[in-house]
Amino acid sequence: MKRPVARLFASACAAALLFGATPGLAQVGTPALDRALAPIPAPRDVAYPGVITLEMDATDIDRRIVSVKQTIPVTGPGSLILLYPEWIPGNHGPVGPVDDIADLHVTAGGQALRWVRNTVQTNAVQVEVPAGATSVEVSFKWLTPIDGSQGRVVITDEMLNIQWEKAIFYPAGYYSRQITYQPSLRLPAGWQYGAALDTTSFENGLATFAPITLEHLADSPVFAGAHFRQIDLDPGGRSPVRMNIVADSAAMLAATDEHIERHRVLVDQADYLFGARHFNHYDFLVAVSDRLGGIGLEHHRSSENSVDTAYFTAPASTIGDRDLLGHEYTHSWNGKWRRPADQLTPTLNEPLQNSLLWVYEGQTQYWGQILTTRAGLLSKEQELGSLAMTAATYGFSPGRAWRAMQDTTNDPIIAQRRPQPWGSFQRGEDYYSEGALIWLDADTWIREQSGNRRSLDDFAKAFFGVQDGNWDPAPYTFDDIVRTLNAVQPNDWATFLRTRLDAVGADAPMPLDGIERGGYRLVFREQPNAYQQALYGEYQRNDFQYSLGIGTNNANRITAVRWGSPAFEAGLTAGWEVVAVNGRTASAAVIAEAITASKGNTTPIEMMVKKGDRFRTIRFDYHDGLRYPHLERIEGTPDRIGDILAPRRR
């Protein structure tokens, strides 16, 4: 807490007198270091002199420790500032885990050099290079999380996920694209790997890769494991597309030809949509695991994806992972090649701005769902069920009363994806799914106004499907989006978009216009739609948010309370356990039966709940029955959503 300046000065003077200090006071903020901190040089768009070698040893699987050694060329004596990446691409926030780095040593010609951390920019360290040195060696340990409470687990007994930017230092003063690395990775005996990097040799567990810039190295992770399989998803294609799979056991690698073929169709449907590729090859990295930490992260020539252990062997039971690969693959075009101008920073320590995440992520969410359905990984009925859940979430979002959707693009920075106590009111990262509804709105409007001659597919081809083969990032602005939309179908697109992004409360358009223009309306029924039933069965969730206002898990613990709902008004929060309902031992079925029994009458629902040693009995005066979202066809209207979801043919 900040104290008034006068009181602070008086307190300091009193302390000086008490301890017999000299009249001159210490300067506030002076670092207690044995040397002056050099200013961190601004990045320049010039080549760094020489190639940095990067040797990574990931064989200490038991202790989850990765040993790293870098040799960094230098051109003379003086202060050398080394940066650890802070703003990690795809994470949209300052989340570089510098605290996972330990045992840091810097030497030059065998002489130990003392390093000191910058006390303001704490991801920077400074060393003094002695005269005559031509390089410095940096060695350290990357202490990866041992369990999920310490961060995302990236090493298990069977596999690992190397993200180079989590275990690297680079010299300040240069653009990332101007710093070249020569990386190598030592793996446990017998392990295989997948990566977007180009391999120059792989012998006795040591993989050596071709030199690559820091910009692309940070964008080229590795999945490796004892159980590995690679599948060609584009046989004979002009730029290879591969699926590299690691798994907890060899049995999990099995897949039917039909299931693999649907992933090949996914690649085909992306080609039909975009009409160009911005990579020389693309590698899906897929972990079939419940031990490796969950991930879905985009890269330009690859993506990191973790899926359920039954994703290949029992695909019908893993509906929750169906659209993951489609989403991350779309990012190769949207977010990585076409990149918001305020995301294209010169280094990994320059702050990102997220103002266009409703395009970067929102339109990717839209295309990811569509491509997944066009490929047959989701059926039309399943996608309609998913869309119904999204429509209900944002059509009846309490948080829209106070917070603009545009502002949610700041959440990866201000909240950093920490759990929220009141998600329905705080809003979270709504630019994903509410952003997708905006793009559905735009798509159906273009189709309606053009007599179904044009669609958002035309925008995708014009915006993402140009400069075939070029994979240098192409920045864009809001005006570029508006200009391209106007070329597809004239409209006041700036107002169309800004109204949906910036308005709150009664001024905000309902995000359901695209659904109704698409030929459907949102309705509520007493049974979940088939997609929700399968999804919540897989995740062991129970949904009563549109009736009592709670979600529970299979242990009857309340996991969420909807703002403004009957449960909210009764003072419930997440964390309470439902013990009994209407005098019966609680279960999801018993809660559902009680809600149904009270429909249309005056009989209250009586619920006993428990948190710690506290018990409460709550009587809900709720009589509208169970409510689950569905999409219902509007008779006599074009099925534009059906047209959007239909596979494309050449």
Image: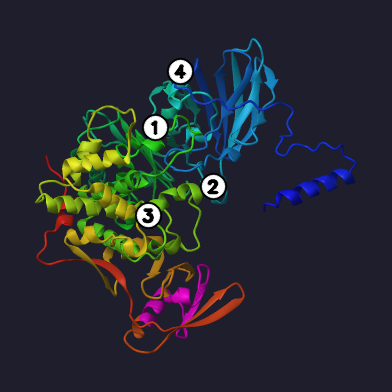
Q: Earlier in the sequence, mark 1 or mark 4?
A: 4
Give me the C-alpha separation between circle 3 and circle 4.
40 Å
The image shows residue 172 at horizontal and vertical percentages of 54, 25
Q: For this view, does 358 lie left or right of residue 41?
A: left
Q: For this view, does 638 lie left or right of residue 396?
A: left
Front residue of this view, candidates 16 and 511 = 16
Front residue of this view, candidates 39 and 421 = 39
Q: Earlier in the sequence, mark 4 or mark 2?
A: 4
User: Which colour scheme appears in the figure?
Assistant: rainbow
Check if residue 569 falls in the magenta segment: yes
Dot label at residue 151: 2
Callout 4: 10 Å neighbours few (<14), some, many (20+)?
few
Q: Quadrant of the C terminus?
A: top left
Q: Amino acid at mark 2?
A: Gly
The image shows residue 431 at horizontal and vertical percentages of 36, 51
Look at discs 4 and 2 and give the one toward the viewer.
4
Q: Is residue 123 above or below residue 446?
A: above
Numbered disc 3: secondary structure: helix
| Residues drawn in magenta | 566-595
User: Disc 1 marks which residue?
Assistant: 195
Give me the C-alpha separation between circle 3 and circle 2.
28 Å
User: Disc 3 marks which residue?
Assistant: 405
Look at discs 3 and 4 and give the one toward the viewer.
3
Check if residue 55 falls in the magenta segment: no
Q: Residue furthest bottom?
A: 602
Residue at 74% across, 34% down: 32
